[in-house]
Amino acid sequence: MTHSQLDPEARLDPEALRGLIARELTGNRQRTTLLTDSVDEDDLVRQHSPLMSPLVWDLAHIANQEELWLLREVGGREPLHPEIDPLYDAFEHPRSERPTLPLLPPAEARAYGHEVRGRVMDLLERATFGGTRLLGDGFAFGMVAQHEAQHDETMLITHQLRTGAPVLTAAPPGPAPADALGLPAEVLVPGGPFTMGTSTEPWALDNERPAHSVQVASFYLDTTPVTCGAYTEFIEAGGYDDPRWWTTAGWQHRQDAGLTAPLYWSRDGGQWIRRVFGRSEPVAPHEPVLHVSWYEADAYARWAGRRLPTEAEWEKAARFDPATGLTRRYPWGNAEPEPSQANLGQGYLRPAAAGSYPDGAAPCGARQLIGDVWEWTSSDFMPYPGFRAWPYREYSEVFFGPEYKVLRGGSFAVSSVACRGTFRNWDYPIRRQIFSGFRTARTATLLPGDSVPPGTPGQRA
Ligand SMILES: [Fe+2]
């Protein structure tokens, strides 16, 4: 799928913006429909894990948020069904409680979604994309499209947790390119300042703002995410049994939870097997490892004599172009992702082999920074200097603090509308039902006589 540009330096005219919004809303809704039509009523209303909502909750919650932000806030309409609002307020009811609520049954949830979407398309026809901050650049529509995309990823996580006969199928990604096996293990990211975050990205959320200059020392980053094969070496070297590699909290959790391998992995004789959307298969050694917690990623990195990258290091590797000193929107430049550049949008239901997507490589040479697997960073989820909560505190502000770790880059399960070089995701360090992987880093120590890597200030606010 080719996207129209949302490049902040090439603003869309209102008709092009209207078309872009319609395509994003429609594309995500097709995915929502597929994820909820592919299971029966019992599977829709059942809770597949205490970590997740019943799928029927996601379905009506998507519609409820769309109604709230677009029909009520932007369109000034009265609530369609005010009595159901509290049921679908994510802050009022934790996920574990949601199955006990008097939720709309599947047919009513679908009808509510159709009703809201029909009115939203009418609103979009007449929208002027100006006058208020919510309407500027179609932000409210973009936020709602991203919200549905995020729930499509959440629902795919529920599908992976679900037991029973497989219902989802997708072709695998193509094999890795011929040069994948010959890639250097790590790439150098030159030291110096760069512009992190954004003040101009039209649909960026509050936690990605504002743009600010960050000093990052030279470091080396893995060219690709850590593979299942490399991770298996950590397991087989006794990594899960050696407290030296684990933080105190991580070791405690490893003991309490009985961790011995990534989630969904099991041992069958001499080989590792994993469950993928209801099917069992041998672990693919060249694929990026998936379903590891921050504690496991951090332990692996220490075992390998390395560390997780900070969030700023990750973003510099993904966006900074030393040749121009500018910060890009994506590793490959400013244009929206093409299918040849990143594995996004649930087109494949798995990450592509490490070394894939040379067309999506960053200036430093790292591949697959966008798409494939979310990458844990060493950083806590904190506000950028100058952060202002908008349009509501509960989007990010209430989550800031050391209990959450930042993940970057998106996964195969997220649509491109909710993934960009500045996009920040966060979760508890014990979580691994998410599509999480990682890559490792090390600080570059320059020896006497080494040339100082180029580093020029980035100025693309
Ligand atoms: Fe939500």
Image (cartoon, helix red, strand yellow):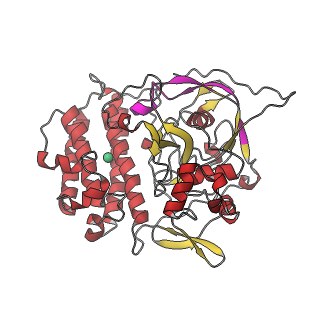
- The stretch in magenta equals 187-215
Residue 356 in view: no
Q: Which residue sits at x=62%, y=30%?
A: 320
Q: Which residue sits at x=51%, y=56%?
A: 253
Residue 142, image x, y percentages? 35, 37
Q: In the rendered view, does 21 fall on the left or right side of 328?
A: left
> Quick check: 380 above or below 101?
above
Q: Quadrant of residue 18?
A: top left
Q: Quadrant of residue 218?
A: top right
Q: In the rendered view, does 223 fall on the left or right side of 352?
A: right
Q: Is 210 covered by the magenta stretch?
A: yes
Between 445 and 77, the residue placed more toward the observer is 445
Residue 69 in view: yes
Q: In the rendered view, does 147 fall on the left or right side of 235?
A: left
> Quick check: 51 above or below 128?
below
Q: Which residue sits at x=73%, y=25%?
A: 454
> Quick check: 125 above or below 179?
above
Residue 83, image x, y percentages? 12, 48
Residue 441, image x, y percentages? 67, 42
Between 174 and 443, the residue placed more toward the observer is 443
Between 15 and 444, the residue placed more toward the observer is 444
The residue positioned farthest toward the bottom in the image shown: 269
